[in-house]
Amino acid sequence: MPGDLLVLQVSQKRTRTVPRVVWMGLTRGAASLIQFLDGASVLRGAAVVSTSGVHRVENWYLDPLREIRVGATEYSESHQAHLTVTQFTTTAGRKFSVPTGVANSYARGRRVWWSPQKN
């Protein structure tokens, strides 16, 4: 499957059960993360698997995520509009956003995942 993949460890709130691992396309996954704001499930871990359009699995690499924010607003030059985005920050400090819709007003977004940076 070409494109980047979102890998999530998901579990029920207030439990110590072993988290389920969910793999999904980054674009669809970015739009679905809003369910973790007020839902019964929480994220216990998150990463992006970068396939870079390469067909061989040996060439993929894993980018652990430090933070995910949903519902933020950014201006898109190509669309000439403000878009609602999901913002991702990797543990290495790389930041990128995935558009999820058209924005009606400015928003900073809400954090659904955060992991303290380890030194």
Image: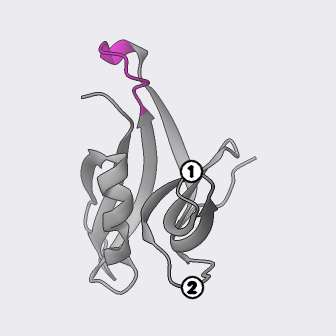
Q: Secondary structure at mark 1?
A: loop
Q: Residue at x 37, y 13 (%)?
A: 58
Q: Residue at x 28, y 68 (%)?
A: 11
Q: Position of residue 103 (x, y in %)?
A: 50, 76
Type of the residue with mark 2? Ser
Q: Position of residue 67 (x, y in %)?
A: 58, 61
Residue that extends furthest to the front in the rendered view of this protein = 80
Q: Which residue carries the number 1 mark?
A: 78
Q: What are the residue bounds of the magenta stretch?
A: 50-58
Q: Which mark is residue 4?
A: none
Q: Which residue carries the number 2 mark?
A: 105
Left or right: where 93 falls relative to 115? right
Q: Residue at x 39, y 37 (%)?
A: 4
Name the mark nearer the viewer: 2 or 1: 1
Q: Position of residue 96 (x, y in %)?
A: 59, 49
Front position in the image: 116 or 79: 79
Q: Position of residue 72 (x, y in %)?
A: 56, 73
- Asked if residue 118 is positioned above or below residue 4 in the image, the reply reads below
